[in-house]
Amino acid sequence: MGIFTWIILGAISGWLASIITSNNKKMGLVKNVLIGILGAIIGGWIFSYFGQAGVTGLNLWSIFVSFVGAAILLVVINLIKD
């Protein structure tokens, strides 16, 4: 995957995760992209650990994997901040 694909994937999944974890008002585009990309790495590792495919490209499965990782990351960040 190219850098442009990672940015799009990160933006979508980071934005969705920030909405679900009630962080949307605190985050902008750059934070959403960074959280989404880190979420893709975390989600890919978690899904691979359980024998599933990780991030495979710009598709619904990869958005789901990245979203799960980003949501986990945001929950952990919220626990540390509070």
Image: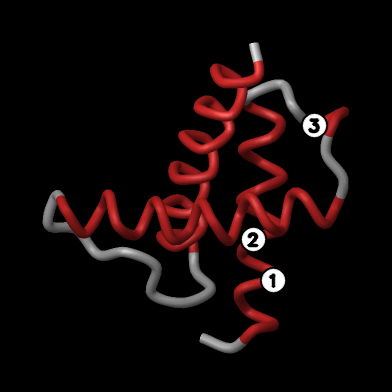
**Do the residues bearing badges 2 and 1 touch, measured as CB atoms within 8 Å?**
yes
Residue 30 at x, y = what percent? 82, 57
* Residue 5, above or below 65: below
The outermost residue toward the left is 51
Which residue matches tag 3?
Answer: 24
Mark 3 or mark 2: whose residue is earlier in sequence: 2
Mark 3 or mark 1: whose residue is earlier in sequence: 1
Q: Crowdedness of circle 3 by 10 Å Cα count: few (<14), some, many (20+)?
A: some
Q: CA distance from mark 3 to mark 2?
A: 14 Å
Instruction: Identify the amino acid type marked 1.
Output: Ile
Q: CA distance from mark 2 to mark 1?
A: 5 Å
Which residue matches tag 1?
Answer: 7
What residue do we see at 54% from left, 56% from top? Answer: 38
Which secondary structure, mark 3?
helix
The quarter holding residue 82 reads top right
Q: Crowdedness of circle 2 by 10 Å Cα count: few (<14), some, many (20+)?
A: many
